[in-house]
Amino acid sequence: MLSAHHLHYAYPEAGQWHTVLKDVSLELALGEQVALVGSSGSGKSTLLNLLGGIDKPASGRIFLKNQELTALKEPALTLFRRQQIGFIYQQFNLIPTLTVAENILLPLGLLRVAAKEQQERLAQWLAAIQLPTRANAFPDQLSGGEQQRVAIARALIHQPALVLADEPTGNLDAKTGQLILDLLFNLAAQAQQTLLVVTHSKAVAERAERILVLQEGVLENSSSTLAW
């Protein structure tokens, strides 16, 4: 469903090129749940941004559902990303001036989904994330766990093929983080969405079906057991 081939990524720093990713290749199957682990600065978030079409590699190719992301021009890439990819971040990234409902509905609005269908999906997702009465609340009126639940609904409501999560429990306590993980993994599994989670947490990684280990820009191994 997703494949990346020989990705290289570097940026200029103090008059020299700093290499972040070196010849990274990977494949993710439809509905697969995968964790990406590695030490700080190993290139995990960079790889996630490349796979999500936010950044472009210096060289290499990325395919999602047989569409080559690395060949798309910006307008087409933006539309494809809106349709096929959902993002979840450690910092929640909710828009503070929008209500819970407005934040969740953002992807559907950008895709010009009919208003009636938007409201139907909103009701379903507010129930799924167990916030049926908080549609008109603003982000600063929610706990961290509630904000991340809203972020999950926003990432999944447009039924993307690929969900990319960057340290989704990094700002939460252990108990709340466990609840968020249960919600994220279960909802993605129900929809047969491919899920890739960047994490420093062994507990998070062990929830995945497979673990990718990235060290100093090199993808070292892929296994069903934690080896890092």
Image (tube, grey):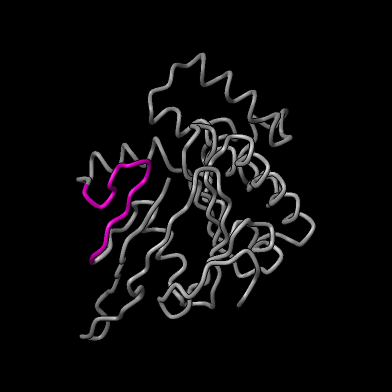
Please, is residue 137 above or below residue 122 in the view? below
Q: Residue at x 45, y 28 (%)?
A: 108
| Residue 60 vs residue 90, the one in the foreground | 60
| Residue 213 vs residue 47, the one in the foreground | 213
Looking at this rendering, what residue extends furthest in the right direction? 175
Please, is residue 218 above or below residue 101 in the view? below
Magenta stretch, main secondary structure, is strand
| Residue 207 vs residue 147, the one in the foreground | 207
Q: Residue at x 74, y 35 (%)?
A: 130
Quarter of the figure that contains the C terminus: bottom right
Q: Position of residue 214 (x, y in %)?
A: 48, 73
Q: Does 98 appear in magenta?
A: no
Q: Does 62 appear in magenta?
A: yes
Q: Position of residue 186 (x, y in %)?
A: 68, 42
Quarter of the figure that contains the N terminus: top left
User: Which residues make up the magenta segment?
Assistant: 59-71
Q: Position of residue 201 (x, y in %)?
A: 66, 68
Left or right: where 76 falls relative to 144: left
| Residue 30 vs residue 111, the one in the foreground | 30
Q: Residue at x 28, y 74 (%)?
A: 10
* Number of marks in the rendered image: 0
Left or right: where 196 falls relative to 136: left
Q: In the rendered image, which quarter is residue 43 located in?
A: bottom left
Left or right: where 120 falls relative to 86: right
Q: Residue at x 23, y 85 (%)?
A: 16
